[in-house]
Amino acid sequence: MGRGRVEMKRIENKINRQVTFSKRRAGLLKKAHEISILCDAEVSLIVFSHKGKLFEYSSESCMEKVLEHYERYSYAEKQLKVPDSHVNAQTNWTM
């Protein structure tokens, strides 16, 4: 016997919303830990509550190392995309 689908909308009752947040946050942190162990993946998770409280998980010893890796990767991705669009624009002008 399974559970029914949960309608994706904001929970209006403040207490129920907080309880749901706490339970789902714990589940999300657990899943992040599991995928890092089972798949030997670098995982970082940052969650802010509606009050601005920070909750984080990082499979590395510190979050900064993973964030630096992400910044290097996203910067390299942007560098790969920019020249392609520049070349395509020149090609279009020559046609």
Image (cartoon, grey):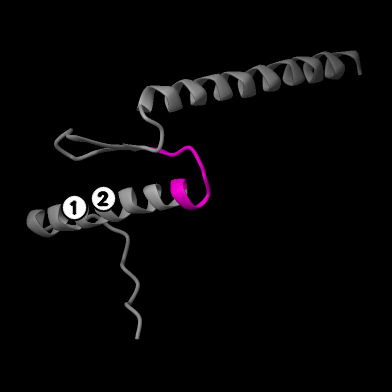
Residue 46 quadrant: top left
Asked if the residue at tag 2 contacts the one at tag 1, i.e. Cβ–Cβ closer than 8 Å, the answer is: yes
Give the residue displayed 45% in from the left and 45% down from the top.
36
Q: Residues within 10 Å of mark 2 (few under 14, many from 20)?
A: some
Vertical position of residue 76 compared to residue 44: above or below: above
Residue 52 quadrant: top left
Quadrant in which the C terminus is drawn: top right
Q: Of 90 and 60, which appears nearest the observer? A: 60
Give the residue displayed 20% in from the left and 40% down from the top.
49
- What is the x, y in percent for residue 4? 33, 77
Q: How crowded is mark 1: few (under 14 residues within 10 Å), some or many (20 or more)?
A: few
Query: Secondary structure under badge 1?
Result: helix
Numbered badge on residue 66 = none
* Amino acid at pointer 1: Ser
Point out the residue furthest to the left here: 15
- What is the x, y in percent for residue 18? 13, 52
Find the distance from the CA under tag 1 to the CA under tag 2.
5 Å
Instruction: Work out whether residue 46 can be spotted.
Output: no
Vertical position of residue 88 compared to residue 4: above or below: above
Residue 11 located left or right of residue 33 = left
Q: Mark 2 points at which residue?
A: 25
Query: Secondary structure under badge 2?
Result: helix
Vertical position of residue 15 compared to residue 41: above or below: below
* Amino acid at pointer 2: Arg
The magenta region covers 36-46
Residue 79 quadrant: top right
Vertical position of residue 66 compared to residue 44: above or below: above
Residue 59 lies in the magenta-colored region: no
Residue 45 lies in the magenta-colored region: yes
Give the residue displayed 34% in from the left and 86% down from the top.
1
- What is the x, y in percent for residue 43? 44, 39
Numbered badge on residue 22 = 1
